[in-house]
Image (cartoon, rainbow, N blue to C red):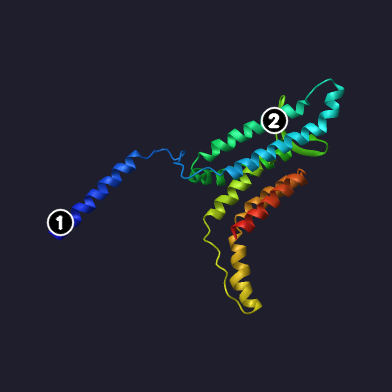
């Protein structure tokens, strides 16, 4: 009889779990939010955006005043881009991390092809070939590469186990227990280095350095 009670209890638990699973959204693009948003991070992004708009305004104020304008045109453009970026950041925060990780590899392949293509099909401006030109519109793939490099490295590091500091007594053990495992853990950096090399060939040293510094901080944070 005791066994029958256990079986009935397990069946009730299974039915309850099944009912709960049926209530969950089937689409993986939305996830249930737990806890409060990271308001500190949001505030930091807003402040950084405002500083950027102020810097653009300060740089173009004299020219705008000479033309009788209150605000430089670049300030309005920068402000609109900032608002669009904040809205886009909020939208991405609603997507399940699993779905974001799934676009890491296809995104890096696509951006690598675009970076190769721009070397042959891009528009040369001031000695640099960085832009695709489509009539009045232009597209710079290295700007999109910044985003996909971050997604790619985050997806790679997400699968790593936490680093446990090993014990070693001599340089040989340090190489075997520390150096080689650290190099193996840095494999998400390899596709980023390929992208950086393609960007440098344009040449675009500034963007290449930004991606490398960002990747370095992510590598340090991942252990």
Q: Judging from the image, what secondary structure is the residue with disc 1 in?
A: helix
Is residue 220 in view from this perspective?
A: yes
Image position of 53 (left or right of 65):
left
Callout 1–callout 2 Cβ contact below 8 Å: no
Q: Position of residue 150 (x, y in %)?
A: 62, 47
Label 2: element kind = helix
Q: Quadrant location of residue 47?
A: top right
Q: Position of residue 171 (x, y in %)?
A: 66, 77
Q: Nearer the viewer, residue 119 or 4?
A: 4
Against 104, is 184 above or below?
A: below
In the displayed structure, 76 sits above or below 96; it is above
Give how far across and how far down residue 102 sits, in percent.
Answer: 51, 45
Residue at the far top: name it. Answer: 68
Quadrant where the C terminus lies? bottom right
- Residue located at (53% from left, 54% from top): 158
Q: Residue furthest right?
A: 66
* Residue 99, numbered circle: none
Name the residue carrying label 1: 4
Residue underneath mark 2: 79
Q: Residue furthest left?
A: 1
Residue 136 x %, y %? 72, 24
Residue 133, visible in the rendered structure: no
In primary-sequence order, the first of circles 1 and 2 is: 1
Q: Residues within 10 Å of mark 1 (few under 14, many from 20)?
A: few
């Amino acid at each position: 009889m005791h066994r029958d009670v256990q079986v009935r209890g397990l069946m009730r638990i299974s039915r309850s779990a099944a009912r709960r699973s049926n209530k969950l959204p089937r689409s993986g693009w939305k996830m249930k939010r737990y806890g409060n948003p990271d308001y500190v991070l949001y505030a930091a992004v807003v402040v950084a955006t405002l500083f950027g708009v102020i810097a653009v305004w300060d740089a173009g104020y004299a020219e705008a005043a000479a033309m009788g304008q209150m605000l430089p045109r670049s300030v309005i453009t920068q402000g609109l881009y900032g608002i669009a970026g904040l809205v886009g950041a909020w939208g991405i925060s609603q997507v399940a991390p699993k779905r974001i990780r799934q676009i890491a590899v296809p995104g890096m392949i696509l951006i690598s092809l675009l970076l190769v293509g721009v070397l042959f099909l891009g528009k040369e401006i001031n000695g640099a070939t960085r832009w695709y030109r489509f009539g009045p519109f232009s597209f710079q793939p290295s700007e999109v590469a910044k985003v996909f490099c971050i997604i790619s490295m985050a997806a790679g590091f997400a699968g790593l186990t936490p680093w446990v500091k090993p014990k070693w007594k001599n340089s040989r053990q340090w190489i075997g227990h520390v150096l080689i495992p650290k190099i193996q853990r840095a494999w998400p950096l390899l596709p980023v280095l390929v992208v950086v090399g393609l960007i440098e060939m344009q040449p675009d040293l500034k963007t290449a350095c930004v991606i490398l510094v960002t990747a370095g901080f992510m590598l340090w944070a991942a252990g």
